[in-house]
Image (spheres, rainbow, N blue to C red):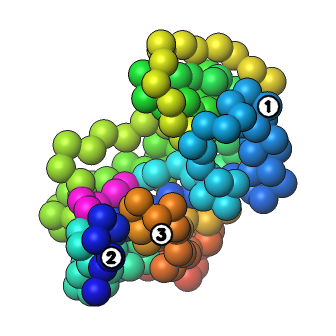
Amino acid sequence: MAKRGILHRAFFAFRPAPLVSAQIGNMIEEIAPGLPRVGNERLHSTLGITNDYKALPAPLIDELRAIGGEISADRFDVTVDRLSGSEGSVALRPSRINPAWRDLEAPIEKKMRRAGALRDGWRFSQHITLYYRSGVPFSRVIGGYDWSVEELLLIHSRVGAGEHRVLDRWPLRGRNDPQFRLF
């Protein structure tokens, strides 16, 4: 049974490489000490997300695992080099749209929407949320962080508890990988 106040959601994502996550975490501590932040182990880019539930329905998880198994994409490089603040959060973003990032996200969104699993009103944006705050919007170029995205993750989030658990993972092997089959 879910604790009072704790909700559950699932989402597809990729994470920065561990060394890059640590570097980003150091930067967050320098620029926003004491603010509620995303822990290094939870830094990610969301590619598709469900609504929130008191408990995740098993058929939903089965459907999401099937969707993840159908995704075929090449490994790709990411550079996030813009610090961007909204009124409620601060994120890292690329200065230029990354077509490979969008190519990984687009079929996930399409399949989740078709299955009725996509969060109501959700819109994709290339970013990694760093911390939460109240403030004036801003955007500035920074030195940046680079890594290769090599796997797609399905993550269970306990909203309000700050917990993420990887439910499944799929290596990005490319569209021509002989192990990939069209459904």
Viewer-side residue, 4 vs 136 = 4
Name the residue carrying label 2.
Answer: 3
In this rendering, would 165 be left or right of 113? right
Residue 169 vertical placement versus 123 (above, below):
below
Name the residue carrying label 1.
Answer: 30
* Cα–Cα span, label 3 and label 1: 28 Å
Q: Which mark is residue 92?
A: none
Q: Residue 38, percent across and down?
A: 59, 49
Viewer-side residue, 104 vs 24 = 24
* Cα–Cα span, label 2 and label 3: 19 Å
Name the residue carrying label 3.
Answer: 155
Residue 152, magenta (yes or no): no
Q: Residue 96, percent across and down?
A: 59, 23
Check disc 2 and give the amino acid type. Lys
Q: Residue at x 37, y 49 (%)?
A: 106
Q: Residue at x 30, y 39 (%)?
A: 123
Check the picture and name the quadrant holding the C terminus: bottom left
In this rendering, would 129 be left or right of 27? left
Residue 178 vertical placement versus 36 (above, below):
below
Q: For the magenta stretch, what is the residue range?
A: 48-52
Q: Residue at x 38, y 79 (%)?
A: 65
Q: Secondary structure at mark 2?
A: loop
Check the picture and name the quadrant holding the N terminus: bottom left
